[in-house]
Image (cartoon, rainbow, N blue to C red):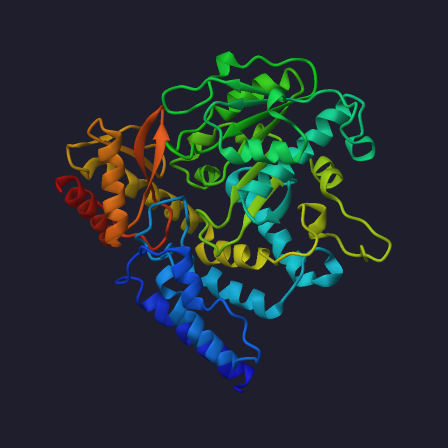
Amino acid sequence: MVGMRELLRTAAELAATYLDEAATRPVARPVTLADMVAALGPTLPDDGTDPAQVLTDLARDADRGLVLTNGGRYFGFVEGGVLPAALAADWLTSTWDQNPGFFALSPAAAAAEEISRTWLCDLLGLPATCSAGFTTGAQLANFAGLAAARHHVLGEAGWDVEQRGLFGAPPVTVVVGRERHATIDRALRFLGIGRDQIVEVDTDSQGRMLPNLLELTDGPTIVCTQAGNVNTGAFDPIGEVCDLASEKNAWVHVDGAFGLWAAASPSLRHLVAGVEKADSFATDGHKWLNVPYDCGIVLCARPEAHRAAMRLSADYLVRDGERHGSDWTPESSRRARGFAVYAALRSLGRRGVAELVDRSCAQARRVAAALPPQCEVLNDVVLNQVLVRVGDDDEQTRAVAAAIQRGGATWFGTTTWRGKAAIRISVSDHATGDTEIDVLIGAVREAVAA
């Protein structure tokens, strides 16, 4: 049996080899679940295996099923790569094995989250007093923000939802754009708010909510806006929506899984004009901030509502100190995600975050301009999303995407936009440079020609 230091050295060597090969390995390979189960071994051994052997076997046997999302050539779902400082900090996080649920469990983790909170508020132009919770992703960040919203709007109507539940409560109306992300509806479902309580507002050709169609009632109301449409990258007119919502005392939530990071760029900040007027915000660290999975962030301009909706208390829990992570997320025990966020923000600095966002958007514009004439770009490329259709043919569009996926040099997926198939290209990895964009453009040209 090897010692711990040697085991960690083995892990580091295996990880370094994977990263060294990132420039040449396929982004993805055709493989089935049955293939991978067979490769990894479905039978639990009777006797234990040496840890170093387990690692070596795992690296070998999992290899075919690994998708290279952090090597600069992945343009599928909005998947950020992994910054070196964030990766190394995440290794330390696993080694330290800290639980930020309560201050007593890890004062260091609490401090990293608190510092990251202040930096994020500053970087994204949000009120400095916003509370922050570090979740698994934007799904739970949306959930937490909307839970705070539910608490507040029902409280304004004289109903304590934490004490009395939803049975008999005044109905809550949730106003959403037609092109909202699916995680909004799912979060509302978790919160006991059904489809009948959702009012859908029509959108323009880019998926932006049309504020002139926004009709708000006097009852408990939540308005969900979007910073960065998942297909087009377009932004709802958040500031205008906030002004309209304030007239009816409605809560405004911003789903900014990746688009909220536009606020960090002086050249793109106009896209989120007025975002500071909103009440709650959801974004991802594992997208444009390029920290390892998993990391979502909820921020709330009404900390009292946020804490009331999330707070955990029990007689045996020590509540000394000024920050308890369980006050701000649906989780109690969880990973100390704040360390990787802290490391990413400190390693990049204010200008580095802006440059990462600006570079990705410039690369998206370059892709849109360099595609062959058979490709039609369906969206205004205002951010990092390029929506493409090959000819006027669903089958051909999907065939081009499938051919590129099989080739392995790069990867992107398809979507349906306004009833038609389209290719969706997302640029959000710090490792994506001119060479990787050239590979993408070349792969599209070759597939279209074929």
Check the image and report above or below for 91 versus 203: below
Check the image and report above or below for 188 versus 343: above
Residue 228 lies in what quarter of the image?
Answer: top left
Q: Is residue 116 visible?
A: yes
Residue 112 lies in what quarter of the image?
Answer: bottom right
Residue found at x 44% / y 19%: 203
Q: Quadrant of the C terminus?
A: top left
Name the residue nearer the viewer: 17 or 210: 17
| Number of numbered markers | 0
Whole-percent x, y for residue 370 in the image: 19, 39
Whole-percent x, y for residue 413 in the image: 33, 42
Residue found at x 54% / y 56%: 342
Residue found at x 61% / y 14%: 216
Whole-percent x, y for residue 242 in the image: 57, 23
Whole-percent x, y for residue 233 in the image: 39, 33
Name the residue nearer the viewer: 123 or 33: 33
